[in-house]
Amino acid sequence: MRLLFVCTGNICRSPTADAVARRRAADAGLDWHVDSAGTGGWHAGEAPDPRATAAGAGRGYDLSVVQAREVDPADFRRFDHIIAMDGSHLRFLRRMPGAKGGARLSLMMDWAGEPGVEVPDPYYGGDDGFDDVLDMIERAVVGLISDLGPNPGAGPDQSKG
C-alpha cells in the first residue's frame, strides 16, 4: 500500500499523518510506503514545524525523517491513495494533471468515519492545536489500517465527488 498525505505547506498536518501512519502500519506488521507533500513548495526541503515535531515526539512519533516537498502530478501514479487534510487540498488535487487516473482521493477524516470533517491548520494557533490535530489523525489512521490493512477494501473514495 502506498499512501500520500497532503496539506498546504507539508510542515504540520501532512508530516504528522505521515509519521503516525508509518509507525502504526509498522506496528501492525504492514509493509506500507508512506509519504507527505504540500500543495505549494514554500517550505520545500524544510523540516516539519517544531511544534508538530514536539507533539508527535510526545506520543512516540518521529517526524524528523520528513522533509517538505510539493505534490507532483506523478504522485497520482506512484500512490494508491492520496489523502487530503481539508477540502481546499482535495479541490486542488482534483484539478491537478494526472488526477483522473491512478490514486484514489479522499479526506483524512473520512477514514475515521467523520465524512466531510476537515483537519484544521494549527500553524497560527497555540501548541494545543497540534495535539488536537494529532488526536484527529490518530483516529483516521486507525480507520486506514482497518480498511486497507491485511484484507484491504476500497475505503472512502472522493475521487468522483
Image (cartoon, rainbow, N blue to C red):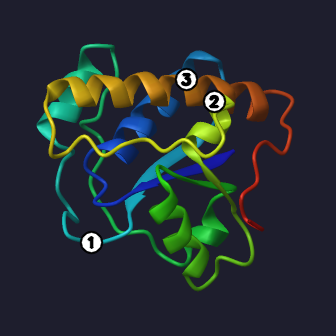
Q: Is residue 71 visible?
A: yes
At horizontal 43% and vertical 41% (from top left) the residue drawn is: 119
Q: Is residue 145 left or right of residue 43?
A: right
Residue furthest out toward the bottom = 97
Query: Of helix, strand and loop, which one carries label 1?
Result: loop
- The amino acid on which the numbered mark 1 sits, given as a three-letter code, is Gly
In the rendered structure, which disc, 2 or 1, sits on the residue that comes first in sequence? Answer: 1
Image quadrant containing the C terminus: bottom right
Q: Residue at x 87, y 29 (%)?
A: 151
- Distance between the alpha carbons at the discs numbered 2 and 3: 6 Å
Q: Position of residue 130 (x, y in %)?
A: 26, 30
- The residue depicted at 81 percent of the width and 27 percent of the height is 150
For the point 12% across and 36% down, which residue is it?
50
Q: Amino acid at mark 2?
A: Ala
Mark whose residue sits in front, 3 or 1: 3
Indicate the position of residue 89 as horizontal and vertical percent values: 47, 63
The answer to whether marks 2 and 3 mark residues whose Cβ atoms lie closer than 8 Å is yes
